[in-house]
Amino acid sequence: MVDARTSMIKERLKRISRIIAVSSGKGGVGKSLVATTLALTLARKGCKVGLFDLDFTSPSTHIILGAKDAQPKEEKGIVPPVVKGLEYMSLIYYCGDNAAPLRGADVSNALIELLAVTRWSQLDYLVIDMPPGIGDAVLDLIRLVKRVEFLIVTTPSRLAFETVKKQLSLLQELKMPIIGVVENMKMNSAQSIQQQTEKLGIAFLGEIPYDLKVEEAIGDETKLLGTALAQKVKEIAAGRLCVDGN
Ligand SMILES: Nc1ncnc2c1ncn2[C@@H]1O[C@H](COP(=O)(O)OP(=O)(O)OP(=O)(O)O)[C@@H](O)[C@H]1O
Ligand SMILES: [Mg+2]
């Protein structure tokens, strides 16, 4: 289907230098926390950053950020509010606290619509928090935003990494850029995820420890940036995204 909105999307995103989708074949591995912390970290380094929550089933970055009072503005499209130094957009602005039980075609439609209407300014980075899985949202994003780069999150569990491996090979088949794999909620020193990742020819970006402070930091970006999780995200950003590590 030719959709006028696809050319609109290109236009909307053309002033953004890098678009990073934080994604995982598996749910509950820490995508939203990593995406939000990465966006905040890059912004604190002086970059211009947007955070885009494209998880239609369980959007959560607004909770992590504490973005309750912000509202987008309608002006030749939708202008995202600035929340904690980030240009911020989420479906939450359209469905509030109600569930958004979208079906396949509706998910695609909502994704296309949000991409097409949101007026980001000139950004160094747009970080996208993706829904779990390798389904329609990922495939639509690849189709519509060809230059999106993937940052993949897994946990140390074989159950997570089995699914993540499928996602990695799909992305490799589609020749999509993969920044690398982050192993989150690490509780020991096993190296199996690192080894398997590198065997696939994909960069292993690092381990994020399981950090009890994360839960109490939700909704408070200053606390969040003080966690061990944020420290590792900062190191990863310094190593891979060309910002300094201090
Ligand atoms: N390094 C960590 N230390 C402690 N808790 C963590 C860590 N990373 C994530 N969590 C916790 O794990 C849970 C899942 O995190 P999060 O919501 O970011 O995952 P997700 O991959 O975005 O989930 P979904 O697939 O539902 O979108 C949350 O309760 C979060 O607080
Ligand atoms: Mg999430």
Image (spheres, grey):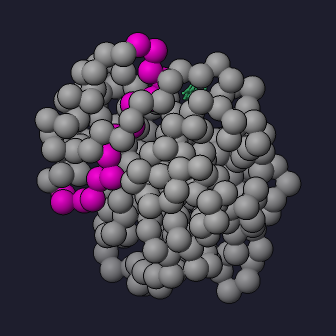
The residue at the far right in this view is: 69
Nearest the eye: 3 or 157: 157
The residue lying furthest to the top in this view is 188
**Relative to 227, is 129 above or below?**
below
Taking depth in this image into account, of 63 and 42 the one nearest to the observer is 42
Give the residue displayed 32% in from the left and 62% down from the top: 142
Q: On the picture, is 89 further left or further right than 127?
A: right
Query: Does the rendering let one see residue 113?
Result: no
The rendered magenta stretch, by its main secondary structure, is classed as strand
Query: Residue 34 location, x and y as percent?
Result: 53, 41
Q: Residue at x 81, y 59 (%)?
A: 70
**Residue occupying image coordinates x 19% and y 29%:** 196
The x, y position of residue 47, in whole percent, is 60, 67
Q: Quadrant of residue 42?
A: bottom right
Magenta segment, which residues? 174-188
The quarter of the displayed image where residue 201 is located: top left
Q: Is residue 13 magenta?
A: no
Q: Is residue 186 above or below residue 94?
A: above
Q: Horizontal and vertical percent for residue 92?
A: 68, 52
- Is residue 187 at least partly visible in the picture? yes
- Give residue 233's position: percent from left, percent from top: 52, 42
- The vertical placement of 69 against 132, above or below, is below
